[in-house]
Image (cartoon, helix red, strand yellow):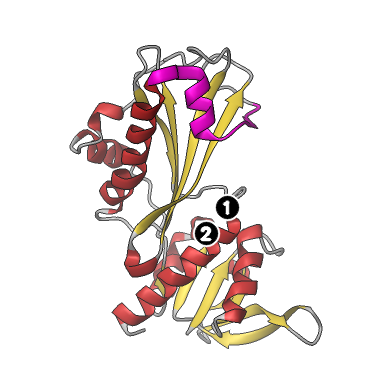
Amino acid sequence: MKIGYICGSSEPDRLCKCLTALTDLYNIEFFYFTEDRVDIDQKTISGSFWDKTKLGYAEKSTSYPHIIDGTTQMMLPGLCIELGKYSYLTHIPSDDSNKILDSIKNSDCCGYLIDSNIKIEKNTGNNFKIRLNVCRGENGEWGLLGMFVLVGYGKDISSNGWALDRKPKQFLEMGFGSEWKTLYDEIIFISRDLPDILQKGRRIVSLAIDVIIDNSSKVKIAGISDTPDYYKCEWQTAKSRILYYNHIYKSRKC
C-alpha cells in the first residue's frame, strides 16, 4: 500500500511527520508532496520519502499512490478530479455550508445549533469553548481523539486569543457544579453522532467541533471545521489514520 500526503508548503506539517514515523513501522510506503510536483501527463508525483540512511526526506519520482491524504483543500479543483481518477482521496473539499446546516437541522443534533450573538461567559468568568477532535479510523468508524477547553479574552465566540485551559471534566465541574455530568454526556453525544450526520454525501476524514454552553446551561455547536488543527493529538490522529488507510485499502481493493 502506498500513501501520498499533500502539504500546503514544501515542509511537512506535524501530522505528516507523525505519519512518516508510524507508516514506517507498519511497512507502508509513504511520501508527501505539493501540488506543483504532480505530473499529470506522466501520471507521476515527485514525492518526498523518508531516507533511513540519511535520516531525512529524499525526493524521487513515483506513480500515483493508492490513497491521498492531507490538505487536499489546497489543491486546484481540476487536480482533485485528476488524482481522484487513480487514487482514493480521503477528503474532497466542498463549499456547501448551507447543506451542512440543513443536515444538522434535520438530525438528532438540531437542538444543539447555536443562536446568533450568544454570550458564553456564564459561570466561568471568561469566554470559552470546548474543542472536539474526531477522526475516522478502524473499519471507517469515527472516534473522539481529543477534547480541550479553550479560553478566550473576549465575551463572544468570535474572540481572538484562545488559550488552552484545564481538562474538560474538571473545567465543567468547577464551572457548572452538579450540572457538569449532564453537560459532559451531551458533548460526548455530539462527538459521536455529528460526524456520521456530516459525512453523508461527503468525503471527510477529520473534524474539529467547537461547542459552548449558553446562559441557560445548554450545550450548543459553535463551529465545525473539516480541516482541523491537530494540536496535542497528532500521534493519536496518525494512528487512527493508518487504521483508516487499511480499511480503505481492503474495502476498495485498491
Q: Regarding mark 1 in the picture, which secondary structure is present there?
A: loop
Disc 2 packing (10 Å; few <14; some 14–19; many ≥20): many
What residue is drawn where x is 49% and y is 33%? 169
Please state the horizontal and vertical placement of residue 59, each as a whole percent of the image. 71, 81
| Closest to the observer, 158 or 14 | 14
Disc 1 packing (10 Å; few <14; some 14–19; many ≥20): some
| Closest to the observer, 189 or 16 | 189
Q: Which mark is residue 129?
A: none
Most distant residue in the front direction: 178
Q: Regarding mark 2 in the picture, which secondary structure is present there?
A: helix
Please state the horizontal and vertical placement of residue 197, each as a whole percent of the image. 26, 47
What residue is drawn where x is 52% and y is 21%? 174
Q: Which residues are magenta?
A: 161-178
Residue 22 makes an appearance in the image: yes
Q: Is residue 128 left or right of residue 220?
A: right
Q: Main secondary structure of the magenta part?
A: helix
Q: In the displayed structure, would residue 105 be above or below residue 4?
A: above
Quarter of the image with the C terminus in it:
bottom left
Q: Is residue 168 magenta?
A: yes
Please state the horizontal and vertical placement of residue 41, each as a whole percent of the image. 51, 83
Q: Which mark is residue 233?
A: 1
Do labels 1 and 2 touch, CB within 8 Å? yes
- Measure the C-alpha gap from mark 1 to mark 2: 6 Å
Most distant residue in the right direction: 54
Q: Which mark is residue 237?
A: 2
What residue is drawn where x is 37% and y is 27%? 183
What's under tag 2, amino acid-wise? Thr
Q: Is residue 210 left or right of residue 165?
A: left
State the image quarter where residue 30 is shown. Answer: bottom right
